Image: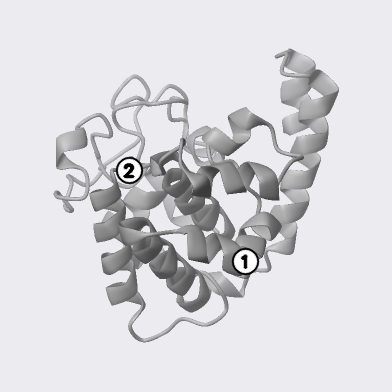
Amino acid sequence: MVVSMLTGLQLGYTKYCCFLCEWDSRAKTLHYLKRDWPQRKSLKVRKKNVQHPALAEWHKILLLPLHIKLGLMKNFVKAMDQTGSVFKYLAEKFPQLSDEKIKEGVFVGPQIHKLFRDDMFNNLLQGDEKKAWDLFCLVSANFLRNIRAEIYKELIEDMLSLYHKLGCSMSLKIHMLHSHLDFFLDNCTMVSDEHGEHFHQEIATMEKRYQGKWSTTMLADYC
């Protein structure tokens, strides 16, 4: 959402939601299969879902590893069997989260790290879900942290293949890993997650304050 606001793109589930290329997010049959999309030549208002003039140049936008991690977790949980024992364990593990947030896979960094260290959760996972989770853990440790392993590209390829097999929807964050892996700077993992976590805590406080209601005052607080 923040990237869309900075680049003037339409919010929500749009056709051309990538600020680097003309990725058709609605062409689900091509997700995970087509990697090269036509590159954007410009961000013109009223063309390719651009509604407002850009507030920032695309090459000055950084995609922080924390937000990529949150996106991977969200799509993984949404693809899980929501009637199975693993999904029920998530509700027991995080009773403070609403059923809606768990169904949508809305977790923050500390909660994901707890699951990384949770033997019970790892033992409950089976089959492709287990393989995808293990690779997600490896990608988090070898690409989305301060250490970038030499085989990080292979790990990401294997993880995305299993995400495709599980039926995970391709979000903008997954699309960036799939088609624009070279966009991530070598030192992007040197940014601390603390700033991002602090931001999420403030947003959670705002959600409680406005209780799901929208107003111009809320938008000013977000900004």
- Label 2: element kind: loop
Coordinates of residue 173 in the picture (x, y in percent): 42, 49
Look at 42% across and 84% down and name the residue there. 149
Look at 68% across and 50% down and name the residue there. 93
Q: Looking at numbered disc 1 in the image, what kind of residue is underneath it?
A: Asp
Look at 21% across and 43% down and name the residue there. 31
The residue carrying pointer 1 sits among few (fewer than 14), some (14 to 19) or many (20 or more) residues within 10 Å by Cα, namely few
The answer to whether 164 appears left or right of 33 in the picture is right
Q: Quadrant of the C terminus?
A: top right
Coordinates of residue 179 in the picture (x, y in percent): 26, 56
The residue carrying pointer 2 sits among few (fewer than 14), some (14 to 19) or many (20 or more) residues within 10 Å by Cα, namely many
Coordinates of residue 129 in the picture (x, y in percent): 37, 56
Look at 33% across and 83% down and name the residue there. 151
Q: Which residue is mark 1?
A: 118
State whether residue 2 is above or below residue 173. Answer: above
In this view of the protein, which residue sits in the foreground, 95 or 21? 95
State whether residue 45 is above or below residue 77. Answer: above
Q: Which residue is mark 2?
A: 170
Name the mark nearer the viewer: 1 or 2: 1
In this view of the protein, which residue sits in the foreground, 89 or 21? 89
In this view of the protein, which residue sits in the foreground, 34 or 137? 137
Q: How many marks?
A: 2
